[in-house]
Image (spheres, rainbow, N blue to C red):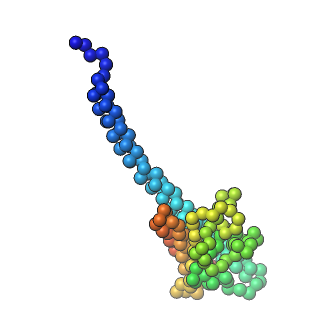
Amino acid sequence: MKKNGFTIIELIITIAILSFGIIGVYGAFSPMVSLNSAIASKFTASQLAQEGFEVVRNIRDNNFEKIRQGQRLAWSAGLLNCSLGCQLDYKTGTSAQGLENALKGYNESDYLKINADGFYGYGQGTATKFRRSVTITQADSPDILKITVVVMWSDGSKPVSFETEGYLYNYQ
């Protein structure tokens, strides 16, 4: 007797093997999707931390320029008010600064917003899951400030943070 096709048992076994294969592949990719989201959040947090440093440098450099123009103020003017934590954004210390962008004490209920141009700030925009605290303290020397930037967010039900620190110098 000749066999011309598959039997029902062969089809069932083939479908079962394919099903296990597809479920296995899905099981392997599912954690990768959540890891990708976590990596994207950590990357955004690292960039927000770097931006925090850059804003503080900009304030220091503006102080240097004011001193050069004859104003009597310290190179660290306004920065040492952040010993307990401050919030700031890319407009802080610039001519575009408004009340919502001014250097002020950290408030854990203020989340950064992303505006239509893709910038994170405290002004208009869509609320994000990120918060940023910048702490500035006097180091061992009066010519050195220690900057600590912490970006916090929630990844599901788990709180996550990215912290970095560095130093700012009076190079005048």
Left or right, 69 with respect to 162, comes to right
Residue at image location 63% in from the left, 64% down from the top = 127
* 87 relative to 2 in the view: left or right: right
Judge by depth and name the residue closer to the eye, 172 or 46: 46
For residue 166, say whether it is visible.
no
Vertical comparison of 35 with 167: above or below: above
Q: Which quadrant holds residue 3?
A: top left
Residue positioned 40% across, 45% down in the render: 26
Q: In this view, which residue lies farthest toward the front?
A: 8
Going 52% across and 74% down the picture, which residue do you hit?
A: 165
Residue 93 sits in which quadrant?
bottom right
Q: Nearer the viewer, residue 124 or 14?
A: 14
Q: Residue 7 occupies which quadrant of the picture?
A: top left
Rendered location of residue 137, percent (x, y): 56, 83
Please state the horizontal and vertical placement of residue 69, each as a whole percent of the image.
77, 80
Name the image quarter holding the N terminus.
Answer: top left
Instruction: Please report the residue visible at 66 percent of the width from the left and 67 percent of the height from the top.
Output: 121
Numbered-mark total: 0
Q: Quadrant of the C terminus?
A: bottom right
Q: Position of residue 118 (x, y in %)?
A: 66, 58
Q: Nearer the viewer, residue 69 or 124?
A: 124
Q: Is residue 146 visible?
A: yes
